[in-house]
Every structure is written in C-alpha cells, then in structure tokens.
C-alpha cells in the first residue's frame, strides 16, 4: 500500500512540475511570462520593458492593468522608447505630462483579448487590414506581411510585433519594436 501511495505522490509531483512548466510559455526580456499572472505582474520582470513599467506607474495605470480586463497590449520595448526623439521619454514622465503620457500608453491598449489568431482573422476579414479601437479612443491598423503582424498608428508609424501571444490572466501582450503615437 505504501508503494502505491509513494508512486501516486511522485506522479502528482511530476504533473505539478509539468503544469508549472506549461504555464511559463514565453520568455520576454529574459523572464518567463506566466499565463496565471496579470499584465503588470509579468511586465515588471521583463528587462526589456523597464521604461514601459516606469511609464505605467507614472501614469497611474498599474491598478487598471492589474484589473480583470481582458486587455490586448502592444508593449513597446526599452529600445522602442529610446528611439523616440531625445528628451521625449523624460518629458512624458514628468508629473505635468501625465495626461499626455496616459494617452500614449492607453493608445497601446485594445479592450478584449486579441491573440495572434484573432488578429489574423480580423486582418483577413478586413481585406488585409484590421482597424483596432484603442482604450484612448484612437485607432490602430493591423496588417500582415510575410507571416508577421504590423501595427500602424494614426501618424503612419509602424511597429512590428516581435513576440506575439504572451498570454496573461487578464489578456494578452504582443511585444512591439516601436512606440505607437496617437494624432
């Protein structure tokens, strides 16, 4: 009887480890992203998103992005923020720039969960382009070429999705290589 109990416990332990491994599906910025954690709890661990996390904190959006959602976030990397004109990030992080910062950040968020399959379906249904309404009230245009998804802002700037389908407990993150700017 003890032999059966030990083997049952061992099997349960193996299954638990397998489940934890399956939950950490993607690594972003050197950190595993866990599908059972929310957008903020995952993003704070990514070395590639420290600027985004600082901006979300400065804008007071932490609690929103920890909320139930679901949200689709097009998350610019530190390199994307660094590519903005000199001084832009520093200016946006100032307390008096909070409304502008909030607008830029919420322009990267779409209500609902649009994983790569849903984005591709919307692009196909739209004849090659999908119009995405952002939380800020603006519009992003998604398209695909060569098996890659691109997102264009209202100013004509285009970001490439470099890591798709980073599943979160309250939505999905798609890592992008440019900061998207509303008009």
Image (spheres, rainbow, N blue to C red):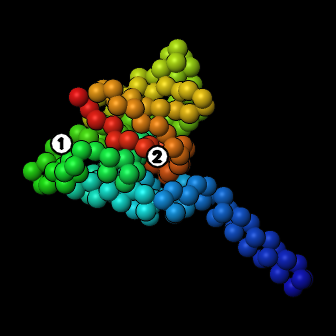
The percent position of residue 155, horizontal first and vertical second, equals: 29, 27
The answer to whether residue 68 of the structure is visible from this angle is no
For residue 19, side relative to residue 141 (left or right): right
Above or below residue 78? Residue 158 is above
Question: Which quarter of the image is occupied by the N terminus?
Answer: bottom right
Tag on residue 175? Answer: 2
The image quadrant of residue 9 is bottom right
Q: Nearer the viewer, residue 97 or 62?
A: 97
* Residues tagged 2 and 1 counted as in contact (Cβ below 8 A): no
Q: Residue drawn at (32%, 46%), measured in percent from left and top?
A: 83
Residue beneath the point at 50% across and 51% down = 168
In the displayed structure image, the side of residue 158 where residue 17 appears, left or right? right
Under tag 1, what secondary structure?
helix
Report the residue marked by disc 1.
Answer: 100
Q: Residue furthest top?
A: 127
| Quadrant where the image shows the C terminus | top left
What count of labels does the image hold? 2
């Amino acid at each position: 009887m003890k032999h059966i109990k030990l083997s049952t416990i061992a099997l349960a332990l193996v299954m638990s480890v397998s489940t934890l491994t399956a939950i950490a599906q993607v690594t972003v910025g050197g950190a595993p992203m866990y599908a059972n954690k929310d957008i903020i709890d995952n993003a704070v661990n990514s070395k590639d998103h420290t600027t985004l996390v600082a901006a979300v904190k400065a804008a007071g959006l932490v609690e929103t992005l920890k909320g139930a959602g679901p949200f689709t976030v097009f998350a610019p990397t530190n390199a994307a923020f660094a590519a903005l004109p000199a001084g832009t990030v520093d200016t946006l992080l100032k307390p008096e720039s909070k409304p502008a910062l909030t607008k830029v950040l919420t322009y990267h968020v779409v209500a609902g969960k649009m994983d790569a399959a849903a984005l591709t379906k919307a692009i196909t249904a739209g004849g090659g382009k999908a119009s995405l309404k952002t939380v800020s009230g603006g519009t992003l245009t998604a398209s695909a070429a060569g098996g890659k998804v691109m997102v264009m802002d209202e100013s004509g700037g285009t970001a490439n999705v470099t890591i798709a389908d980073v599943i979160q407990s309250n939505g999905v993150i798609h890592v992008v290589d440019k900061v998207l700017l509303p008009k």
